[in-house]
Image (cartoon, rainbow, N blue to C red):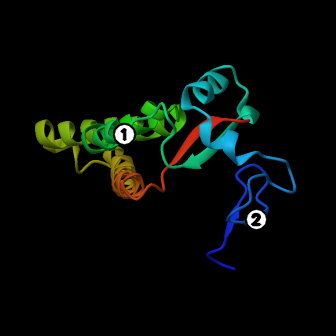
């Protein structure tokens, strides 16, 4: 039963893998598989998060190869999150990328500041930056394995 079941993205009910409609909430999987990321982005801009569901695999309007390239070349700054409309995750990555750049700049050009008490907070932020880099690599692996969750419009 473990491999013959799936979880409804709307309500979380375990269903048979062949089910076309969720018996609990009525989600139609045929319509769900045709949902687009563009509609989800618009719903998130309008503040209607209840219209958004997340699915693995790319919807028709998201190109997987673009998502992989965005993750490889701009992933450390959140580019792949911005591409699919996950702006808060993108902002999180961007902020810590900026912290890492500032830290590197200060360390190289102002080495006398590094040993002061005021600079100790940057060590903590760089640790978080390292965690974000690990998250970036995990995102790349998820995208390559079709396990990365992409927002789509609720049907």
Quarter-of-image position of residue 153: top right
The residue at the point 62 percent across, 30 percent down is: 40
Mark linked to residue 22:
none
- Name which residue lies at 73% across and 56% down: 8
Q: Residue at x 52, y 31 (%)?
A: 85
Nearer to the camera, 63 or 140 = 63
Image vertical order of residue 152 relative to residue 129, above or below: above
Q: Where in the figure is residue 30, as x and y percent of width and height? A: 68, 44
Can residue 153 be seen? yes
15 versus 57 height, above or below: below
| Element class at badge 1 | helix
Q: If the image is split into quadrants, where does the C terminus sit?
A: top right
The residue labelled by disc 2 is: 15
Residue hosting label 1? 67
108 vs 64, left or right, is: left
In-image side of 15 versus 136 (left or right): right
Element at label 2:
strand
Q: Position of residue 64 (x, y in %)?
A: 38, 42
Q: Residues within 10 Å of mark 1 (few under 14, many from 20)?
A: many
Q: Picture coordinates of residue 74 (x, y %)?
A: 29, 37
User: If you read the primary sequence from the N terminus, does the residue marked by circle 1 or circle 2 appear first?
Assistant: 2
């Amino acid at each position: 039963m473990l491999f013959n079941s799936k979880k409804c993205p709307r309500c979380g009910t375990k269903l048979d893998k062949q089910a076309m409609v969720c018996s609990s909430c009525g989600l139609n999987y045929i319509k769900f598989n045709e949902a687009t990321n563009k509609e989800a982005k618009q719903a998130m801009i309008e503040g209607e998060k209840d219209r958004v569901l997340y699915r693995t695999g790319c919807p028709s309007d998201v190109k997987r190869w673009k998502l992989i390239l965005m993750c490889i070349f701009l992933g450390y700054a959140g580019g792949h999150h911005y591409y699919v409309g996950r702006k808060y995750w993108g902002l999180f990555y961007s902020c810590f990328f900026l912290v890492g750049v500032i830290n590197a700049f200060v360390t190289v050009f102002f080495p006398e500041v590094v040993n002061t008490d005021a600079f100790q907070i940057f060590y903590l932020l760089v640790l978080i930056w390292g965690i974000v880099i690990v998250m970036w690599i995990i995102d790349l692996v998820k995208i390559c394995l079709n396990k990365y969750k992409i927002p789509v419009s609720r049907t």
